[in-house]
Amino acid sequence: MRCMRRTEWILVAARLLVAHATGQQPHKGVQGLPTAVIKSMAGDAEDYCDLWFGSYRKGCHHKFQQNLLWLKFTITPSGGDAILVENHNMGACGSAGCSLFMFTKAANDTFAQVLGPEGDIGSVTRIRVLKSITNDHYDLQKTWADQQTTTVYKWNGTRYVPAS
């Protein structure tokens, strides 16, 4: 078996970084997720914990956080980022996917949810950023679970909404 040269290792590492940066590999749990995003999902964590009683409720917030999938990606040509979070907990998923939320940094280091008025349904792995731009934000495309149907989301000035 041949050993990899240093340049080959650098190329492999660069490919992994690109795959990670383009959202091909979602993160699981809250490590690296901004605290303000976690706080923004506190209501969903409470809804999840309300499903449990007695000793089963102990540690439910931690379990909720462990079952979040998320990606960070660029949504504006000027480099503005968003964090797409999939609530992969019991009660948040159905045949169309799981609850999705997208957060952008707002004033005072808070984060605002900007995917539809209350989020959407789908999977973080089926959302992609398009090259087309609306109101200085890249359009997004969601592929549905059937792998054929798609929905395009456009920035309306305050949030992403399905294009009509």
Image (cartoon, helix red, strand yellow):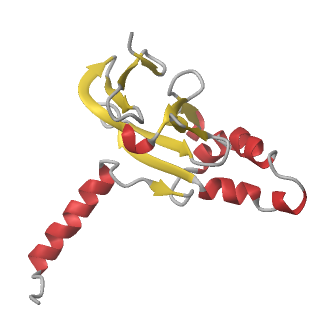
Q: Nearer the viewer, residue 25 or 105?
A: 25
User: Hey, which residue is sitting farthest right in the picture?
Assistant: 54
* Horizontal and vertical percent position of residue 122: 48, 36
Q: Horizontally, is 129 left or right of 38 in the view?
A: left
Q: Is residue 44 above or below residue 17?
A: above
Query: Which image quarter holds the C terminus?
Result: top left
Q: Is residue 85 above or below residue 151?
A: below
Q: Nearer the viewer, residue 84 or 122?
A: 122
Residue 77 visible from this viewpoint: no
Please name the residue shown 64% across and 39% down the image.
Answer: 40
Residue 62 visible from this viewpoint: yes
Please name the residue shown 53% across and 43% down the image.
Answer: 86
The answer to which image quadrant residue 109 occupies is top right
Q: Is residue 70 above or below residue 28?
A: above
Q: Horizontally, is 9 left or right of 62 in the view?
A: left
* Horizontal and vertical percent position of residue 97: 51, 38
* Horizontal and vertical percent position of residue 62: 69, 59
Please name the residue shown 82% across and 60% down the image.
Answer: 56
Q: Is residue 135 above or below residue 47?
A: above
